[in-house]
Image: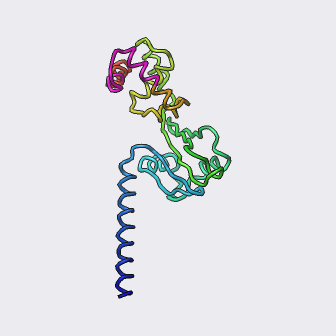
Amino acid sequence: AGGRRREAQTAARRAEAARHREEDEYLQRSLDRAALMLTDGRITFCTVPARRLLARFFPAHHATEVLPPALADWLADGAGGAWRLERDGSRLEATVRGPAYPGRSNRCLLVLVETTPASPDAGSASLARLGLTPREAEVLYWIAHGKTNPETGIILRAAPNTIKKHMQNIMLKLGVETRLAAASRALELIGLS
């Protein structure tokens, strides 16, 4: 009887582990943000967009559980501010959410955002014709390019709530009720629609 019970418990644990793996894989595929969970400096969770960015910006780095050395060194130094790398006309920015390793905790969330540094100036300048302040024009430029409030905040070095407040002001100035309508107006001016 004890052997059967152990076999049943083992089978239940295996089924539970398989279910957790399936859930993790689904979560990795369904998250549209490039984010990595780090524990003691090792990657314990990584979304598909984050894997793509790491592969594109660090083509020689093939380890899936370890950060590329440049990012790992930045984290080890305390991860102050945002980390940046430019390659082929694009910029990869990394910021830490939560305590940075090896600080107060051994876990942190690393968020990656890809930007194109050369394009926002001309695009956001054309948005000023809508009666927006230069900062509001920058915010609308990134929102029109599909960035979320947190991503726009990382790019512009502002809090997500600040970006949200800017979007409220922008929508009032443009006389629209949704972010989508504001983004649509911006894309018409930028010439990308």
Query: Residue placed at 43% from the left, 11% from the top?
Result: 131
How is colour applied across the structure in the image? rainbow
Q: How many marks?
A: 0
Q: Nearer the viewer, residue 44 or 7?
A: 7
96 horizontally vs 152: left or right:
right
Position of residue 3 relative to residue 60, above or below, is below
Position of residue 81 relative to residue 64, above or below, is above
Query: Residue placed at 47% from the left, 47% from the top?
Result: 35
Image quadrant where one finds the C terminus: top left
Please provide percent x and percent y for residue 75.
Answer: 62, 48
Please provide percent x and percent y for residue 12.
Answer: 35, 73
Position of residue 139 relative to residue 24, above or below, is above
Image quadrant where one finds the N terminus: bottom left
- The boundaries of the magenta stretch are 165-182
**Residue 171, magenta (yes or no):** yes
Please provide percent x and percent y for residue 7.
Answer: 36, 81
**Residue 92, magenta (yes or no):** no
- Decide whether the magenta segment is chiefly helix, strand or loop: helix
Please provide percent x and percent y for residue 97.
Answer: 55, 43
Query: Residue placed at 52% from the left, 34% from the top?
Result: 154
52 horizontally vs 176: left or right:
right
Please, which residue is most extreme toward the front here?
Answer: 1
152 horizontally vs 22: left or right:
right
